[in-house]
Amino acid sequence: MLFFSYFKDLVGREVTVELKNDLAIRGTLHSVDQYLNIKLENTRVVDQEKYPHLLSVRNCFIRGSVVRYVQLPPEGVDIELLHDATRREARDG
Amino acid sequence: MSWASLEDIFLSTSLASYLDKKLLVLLRDGRKLLGILRSFDQFANAVLEGACERVIVGDLYCDIPLGLYVIRGENVVLIGELDLEREELPPHMTRVSAADIRRVSCTVRRFPFFGKIAILEKLSI
């Protein structure tokens, strides 16, 4: 539940989601759920020429199981908060 | 099973906001399906009405009609909402028939080293 809560706090931020099929999509994090499925808005594909079929896609739903990385802006990360939450989760979980 | 509330549609990650919309579904095997979402569930299983597969080889593409499809959620990579105001594909791409796209993709598969453009010139498309 830790990452679910963490991503919920990041809603509204610009993120880049890199998928296991090497597709990378940049967009605003609209929502996340318990499976870490992600909904992005204002999406644009990082390497647009390689993926012409995604030209007119502005919003998308990404299944959590296909995500490799979620790239975050460094200002979006409160390391101390994350550390505390992780310690709590390790202690209680 | 509970029905989608307004909150579900606007704030959450459920696919309820995509119902009855024309979508692009990317599958794990690289296929691209287009269609209207009629149903879904918690596994991202989906029912697409009027589905067609968009095959793209280089600058050529073809939409192959498939009809009513039920997609198993584990195969879904991404579900994208198509913006009807924008062009779905770059303008330099050409639409060809299903037979042509099949010929081109077979040739490209056999000779990947030479590049798709060289193959297309050879096939005089």
Image (cartoon, coloured by chain):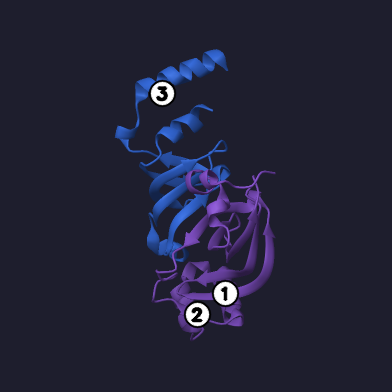
Chain colours: A blue, B purple
Mark 1 vs 2, N-terminal side: 1
Q: Position of residue B98 (x, y in %)?
A: 60, 79
Residue indicated by mark 1: B63
Q: CA distance from mark 1 to mark 2?
A: 8 Å
User: Mark 3 belongs to which amino acid?
Assistant: Leu
Q: Position of residue B14 (x, y in %)?
A: 56, 47
Q: Nearer the viewer, residue A50 or B39?
A: B39
Q: CA distance from mark 2 to mark 3?
A: 50 Å
Residue indicated by mark 2: B95
Write down the chain letter for disc 1. Answer: B
Write down the chain letter for disc 2. Answer: B
Q: Check contact, mark 2 vs mark 3: CB within 8 A.
A: no
The residue at the point 59 percent across, 65 percent down is B36
User: Mark 1 belongs to which amino acid?
Assistant: Asp
Q: Position of residue B123 (x, y in %)?
A: 51, 84
Q: Nearer the viewer, residue B111 or B82?
A: B82
Q: CA distance from mark 1 to mark 3?
A: 47 Å
Query: Is residue B97 rendered to the left or right of residue A87?
Result: right
Q: Residues within 10 Å of mark 2 (few under 14, many from 20)?
A: some
Rendered position, A90 above or below B73: above
The numbered disc on residue B122 is none
Residue indicated by mark 3: A82
